[in-house]
């Protein structure tokens, strides 16, 4: 059925308290995405049953799927709203449902607070310990082969899709999620990052680390950047195993 | 009283500096401040990892000469200045070009996964405005990778304790405190006109609070949203720069807005297709037959018009952006060519993807950007030529900044004048400044200027703090209380716009502003249209007074009320941009008035193109309630001789298809 409008069903609410659903119809244009629909709602914040309401609050920044801001649950699946194209979601005028991610505290409407993900980056020491930003000459050489492994891992936007889909990541568990395990793998491959590999492995072997992964493998299915998260988990699984077995020897 | 230079005040408060904005310019400033021992508060609209720097695709320039072509920082400097049509002050541009190799090495040490040569060295590719391989890159998401590297270093500083002057750790105090989801509401400026801090607003709950700072840096990016749809992130409203301008900061060269030649047309934004696509061999063309509506892949080689290659046989598809944008605009809009019958041209990499190994090589270097085309245009660019059109991309203009020239012609290290705005104590770094690109920015120079700007700003702020007579932390609270009360009153005034007299939807008003600016103040500028735009802006400013607060909620996130502040700023910036363009009677870089183009008007003595005699000067805009007051200052051209900006255009391309009678 061809239609000239897009129907949105949006779950709304405050930080605390119950959620309500509101439905909107916005004019359909070619190559629309979910963000452009929400922008239409801003310009005319009126529900389908003609009730005046407030514009929907949502997070977004780049609109080209590199910043990770606009993750929400669209038709039941966590993904970026910018790359969620209307003609794919609703070829025949089906309603599109938008909900905030469930694994993080809600701020308002579709906005959630993903601070927990950034805190995990601190716990796993997700950085290279450079001596400073002053001039110390060229960096270490890296083979093309290693670069081709590291580059895809470094594209993680901390968007939250993987942890939203992970059954082991929730309020009751400390699991840090697959994304930090994958990033630790990247830093541990880097010629100077390697020098702190042990500290990162220890973090991953600790609370909320790799042993909390239940191998559901949802993460790799939903990652918008196609990061080989389960491969990283298995690589780091081996590394942590080695460290657990022989770590005391290496420490000398 | 504790000396102003000590880290702690007598009452035990840590003296901090403030950086507003957490993209590359801001984060690099933070790192330099921390290394100088100065604790920092960062305020950012979004978690810093989501800043607009992430959108930069192609790479970062540095004349490392890894390909043995004889490239050098001096050549980079010259090409930057020539690319900017000689409007850039030369010492900052020289400083940047000479610092570039060191900056790329630093980023490499920080773990940026740059592409590599077989020997494990950094790989470099070509970009516009040069014939050298000068651009280091990490796939086609270089900005994202650079942002992440600095983000990681700053996160590390978030874990490092502040130490007092005796080296004793101060409990609970870290070198960096991040305030993410915070907006700049105003600057705090004392009776002597010195910036002493800021008022920030927590977007999660609307709370306004004081941040004292011994120096303040705005690293808040460009104003792309003034044009509605652009390649910019939606957070790039220029609000912070507009606030500084309202509070007395001078805004320079506002009229110089870069239009990028190749973006995907869209309804919510115009997504960039990086210049690196052409750097790696991508070609721009249109079907020779103006009525040819076939998909690009079905059009045989002989029926394609590679107009950039024919008009610029030396630089081909890699002429500077202002030139490429004008040529595409002219070819499509005036000469009536099209891509699949649409207002677009083709950008084509399919010839590089004919073999599996060729396709794999393209994927390695360009996947990040081609993936954007695939996802958003819904077509596979490895097999189908992409449809593109120019889009607003970058502001060469921004907050005016000072600099101090060293004897070697670069910037004097540790000078408090470098990157200092016209408000003492307030600095600017990144796209928000105006310092490095003149009338047009070369591709892959923006990541560089952001980081170089930060490297200069940090030490400059440290020097300012050292030399200031008094610390912001030794003032009584009256100054800050007053600023906070004023910011609260302003917010209240916006939040209480709920009556029926407020009948203007601010988002619709923004749409109107954006459409108008996009249509009239970008690639080609005509005085009659600019006058019309100036009239409309005045009228929109009146209508803005009736713009409604669409949401009455308080104590919670309320994006529509905050948007009013940003829209007010965009109207101011639109005014600066348009008035600057109206007054500047010449063609220079991105600022192009067809009436002064000697190519179009060979017999008109007034059509001189670039007019160094009258217009080799920087535009300065200062705020008045009636609109921007313009004045001008000379450009520092002490290092390089002025030259004709020539990229070898062929006057009459041999194979150019005949123009329609009604073209032009």
Image: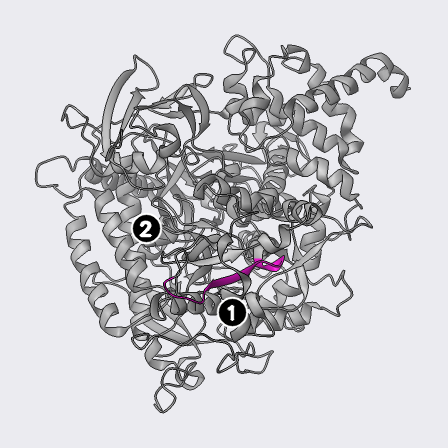
Task: Determine whether, in the image, residue A201 is placed left or right of residue A158.
Answer: right
Give the quarter of the image for residue B480. Answer: top left
- Asked whether the residues under the numbered discs 2 and 1 touch, taking CB atoms below 8 Å apart as contact, a structural biologist would say no
Q: Is residue A73 left or right of residue B450?
A: left
Report the chain holding disc 1: B
In 3D space, how far apart are the residues under numbered discs 2 and 1 (Cα atoms)?
Answer: 28 Å
Query: B204 or B475: nearer the eye?
Result: B204
Density class for disc 2 (Cα within 10 Å; few <14, some 14-19, many ≥20) is: many
Q: Secondary structure at mark 2?
A: loop
Q: Quadrant of residue B276?
A: bottom right
Q: Residue furthest top?
A: A172
Q: Do circles 2 and 1 both sit on a common chain?
A: yes
Asked if residue B286 lies in the magenta stretch, the reply is yes
Using the image, name the chain to which the residue with label 2 belongs.
B
| Pick the front one: B339 or B136 | B339
Mark 1, residue position: B308
Quadrant that contains the C terminus of chain B? bottom left
**Left or right: B413 in relation to B485:** right
Q: Which residue is depicted at the point 41% across and 66% down?
A: B289
Give the magenta-colored segment's residue range. B278-291
Give the x, y percent position of residue A87.
36, 34
When the figure is inspected, residue B601 is found, relative to residue B31, above or below; the finding is below
Considering depth in this image, is B659 or B476 the residue closer to the camera? B659
Q: Which residue is mark 2?
A: B228
């Amino acid at each position: 059925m061809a239609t000239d409008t897009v129907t949105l069903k949006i779950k709304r609410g405050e930080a605390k308290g119950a959620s309500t659903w509101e439905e909107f119809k916005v004019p359909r244009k070619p190559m629309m995405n979910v963000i452009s629909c929400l922008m239409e709602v801003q310009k005319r914040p009126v529900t389908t049953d003609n009730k005046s309401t407030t514009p929907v609050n949502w997070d977004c920044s780049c609109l080209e799927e590199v910043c990770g801001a606009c993750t929400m649950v669209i038709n039941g699946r966590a993904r970026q709203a910018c790359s969620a194209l209307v003609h794919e979601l609703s070829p025949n005028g089906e309603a599109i449902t938008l909900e905030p991610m469930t694994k993080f505290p809600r701020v308002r409407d579709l906005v959630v607070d993903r601070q927990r993900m950034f805190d995990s980056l601190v716990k796993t020491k997700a950085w290279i310990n450079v001596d400073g930003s002053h001039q110390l000459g060229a960096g270490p050489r890296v083979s093309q082969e290693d670069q081709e492994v590291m580059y895809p891992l470094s594209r993680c936007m901390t968007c939250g899709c993987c942890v939203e889909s992970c059954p082991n990541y929730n309020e009751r568990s400390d699991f840090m999620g697959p994304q930090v395990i994958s990033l630790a793998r990247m830093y541990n491959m880097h010629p100077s990052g390697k020098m702190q590999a042990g500290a990162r492995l220890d973090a991953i072997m600790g609370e909320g680390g790799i042993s909390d992964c239940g191998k559901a493998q949802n993460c790799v299915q939903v990652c918008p950047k196609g990061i080989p998260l389960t491969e990283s988990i298995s690589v780091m699984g081996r590394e942590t195993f080695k460290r657990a077995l022989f770590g005391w020897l290496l420490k000398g | 009283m504790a000396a102003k230079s000590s880290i702690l005040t007598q009452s035990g408060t840590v003296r901090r500096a403030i950086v507003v904005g957490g993209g590359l310019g801001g984060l690099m400033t933070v790192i330099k401040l921390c290394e100088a021992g100065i604790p920092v508060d960062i305020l950012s609209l979004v978690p810093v990892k989501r800043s607009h720097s992430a959108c930069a695709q192609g790479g970062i320039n540095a004349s490392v000469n890894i390909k043995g072509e004889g490239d050098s920082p001096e050549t980079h400097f010259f090409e930057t200045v020539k690319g900017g049509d000689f409007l850039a002050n030369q010492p900052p541009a020289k400083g940047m070009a000479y610092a570039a190799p060191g900056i790329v090495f630093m980023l490499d040490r920080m773990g940026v996964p740059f592409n590599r040569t077989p020997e494990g060295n950094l790989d470099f590719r070509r970009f516009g405005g040069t014939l050298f391989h000068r651009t280091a890159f990490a796939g086609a998401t270089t900005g994202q990778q650079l942002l992440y590297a600095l983000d990681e270093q700053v996160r590390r500083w978030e874990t490092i304790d502040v130490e007092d002057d005796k080296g004793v750790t101060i409990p609970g105090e870290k070198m960096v405190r991040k305030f993410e989801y915070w907006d700049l509401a105003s600057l705090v400026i004392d009776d002597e006109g010195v910036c002493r801090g800021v008022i920030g607003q927590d977007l999660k709950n609307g709370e306004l609070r004081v941040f004292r700072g011994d120096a303040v840096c705005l690293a808040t990016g460009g104003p792309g949203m003034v044009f509605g749809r652009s390649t910019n992130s939606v957070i790039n409203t220029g609000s912070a720069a507009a606030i500084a301008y309202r509070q007395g900061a001078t805004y320079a060269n506002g009229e110089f807005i870069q239009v990028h030649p190749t973006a995907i047309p869209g309804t919510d934004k115009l997504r960039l297709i990086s210049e690196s696509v052409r750097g790696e061999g991508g070609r721009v063309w249109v079907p020779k037959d103006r009525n040819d509506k076939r998909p690009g892949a079905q059009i045989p080689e002989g029926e394609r018009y590679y107009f950039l290659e024919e008009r610029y046989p030396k630089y081909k598809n890699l002429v500077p952006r202002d030139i490429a944008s004008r040529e595409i605009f002219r070819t499509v809009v005036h000469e009536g060519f099209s891509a699949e019958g649409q207002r677009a041209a083709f950008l084509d990499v399919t010839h590089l993807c004919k073999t599996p190994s060729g396709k794999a090589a393209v994927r390695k270097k360009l996947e990040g950007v081609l993936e954007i085309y695939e996802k958003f245009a819904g077509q596979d660019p490895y097999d189908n030529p992409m449809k593109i059109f120019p889009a607003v991309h970058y502001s060469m203009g921004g907050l005016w900044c000072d600099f101090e020239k060293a004897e070697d012609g670069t910037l004097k290290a540790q000078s408090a004048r470098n990157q200092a705005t016209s408000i003492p104590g307030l600095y600017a770094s990144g796209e928000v400044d105006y310092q490095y690109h003149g009338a047009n920015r070369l591709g892959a120079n923006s990541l560089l200027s952001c980081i170089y700007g930060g490297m200069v700003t940090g030490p400059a702020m440290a020097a300012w703090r050292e030399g200031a007579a008094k610390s912001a932390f030794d003032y009584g609270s009256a100054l800050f209380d007053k600023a906070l009360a004023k910011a609260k009153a302003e917010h209240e005034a916006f939040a209480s716009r709920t009556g029926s007299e407020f009948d203007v939807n601010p988002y619709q008003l923004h749409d109107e502003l954006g459409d108008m600016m996009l249509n009239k103040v970008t690639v080609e500028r005509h005085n009659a249209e600019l006058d019309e735009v100036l009239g409309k802006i005045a009228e929109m400013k009146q209508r803005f007074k009736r713009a409604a607060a669409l949401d009455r909620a308080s104590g919670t996130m309320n994006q529509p009320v905050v948007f009013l502040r940003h829209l007010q700023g965009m109207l101011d910036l639109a005014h600066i941009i348009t008035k600057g363009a109206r007054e500047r009677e010449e063609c220079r870089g991105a600022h192009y008035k067809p009436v002064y183009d000697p190519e179009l008007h060979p017999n008109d003595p007034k059509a001189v193109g670039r007019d160094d005699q009258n217009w080799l000067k920087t535009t300065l805009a200062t705020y008045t309630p009636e609109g921007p007051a313009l004045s001008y200052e000379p450009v520092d051209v002490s290092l390089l001789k002025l030259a004709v900006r020539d990229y070898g255009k062929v006057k009459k391309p041999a194979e150019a298809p005949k123009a329609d009678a009604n073209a032009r």
